[in-house]
Image (cartoon, helix red, strand yellow):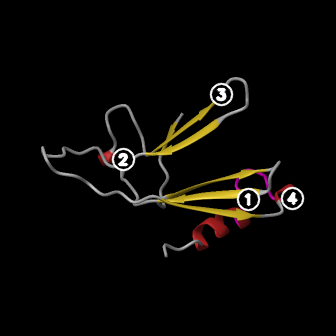
Amino acid sequence: MLENAAEGWIANVNPQTGLFFIKRYPDVSPVQFAPNEAEIELYASPRGNYIEIEQQGAYTRIPSMSSVDWIVTWYLQRIDAKNIIVPGNREMVQRARAIQEP
C-alpha cells in the first residue's frame, strides 16, 4: 500500500504493548515521489506477525562522489492504548503533531 503523509510524520500504536511509535521526517510532495512509489509504504505480513512502515525521501539524482542527508527521527511513548485505538482518533493525531524535533 502506498500513501502520502501530508505533515512529515507517521505513527503507529501497538495495543498489546501500549507503545506509540512516531517517525518525523522532511515532508516529500507527490511531484518528488519515485516512479510508481509514494511517500509512505505499508506492509503487513500475511501471517499477521510483522508490520513495516517505511517513509521514502525525494527521488533525485545524486552525483558521483556526493551524498544526501535525510534525517528521520524516531519517538517512542508508552500510552494507555486500550481506549484510543480507533481510526481518526484526534488525541493520537494531536500527540503526533505535538512531538517536535529536538
Q: Which residue is mark 3?
A: 45
Are there few (<14), some (14-19), or many (20+) residues within 10 Å of tag 2? some
Disc nearer the start of the sequence (3/1): 3
The rendered magenta stretch, by its main secondary structure, is classed as loop
Horizontal and vertical percent for residue 48? 73, 30
Write down the residue under mark 1: 89
Circle 1 SS class:
loop
- Circle 2 or circle 3, nearest the eye: 3
Q: Amino acid at mark 1?
A: Asn
Instruction: Compare residues 59 and 19 and report the one nearer the observer.
Output: 19
Q: Is residue 49 magenta?
A: no
Would residue 69 appear left or right of 100 to someone viewing this image? left
Task: State the SS at label 2.
Answer: helix
Nearest to the observer: residue 62 or residue 91: 62
Disc 3 on helix, strand or loop? loop
Which residue sits at x=73%, y=59%? 89
* Place of residue 33 in the rendered image (x, y in percent of width and height, measured from the top left): 34, 43
Which secondary structure lies at badge 4?
helix
Q: Residue at x 45, y 58 (%)?
A: 72
Is the residue under label 3 in contact with that under label 4 (CB below 8 Å)?
no
Say which residue appears at 78% left-offset and 52% top-offset: 86
Which is closer to the viewer, label 3 or label 1? 3
Residues in magenta, as a range: 84-90
Q: Nearer the viewer, residue 62 or 3?
A: 62
Foreground label between 1 and 4 = 4
Choose top left, top right, bottom left or bottom right for residue 27: bottom left
Question: Which amino acid lies under the numbered mark 2 shown in the image of this protein?
Answer: Pro
Tell me the quarter of the image containing the N terminus: top right
Of mark 2 and mark 3, the one earlier in the sequence is 2
The residue positioned 68% from the left and 23% from the top of the image is: 46
Instruction: Identify the residue position indicated by label 4 in the image.
Output: 83
Give amino acid for label 3.
Answer: Ser
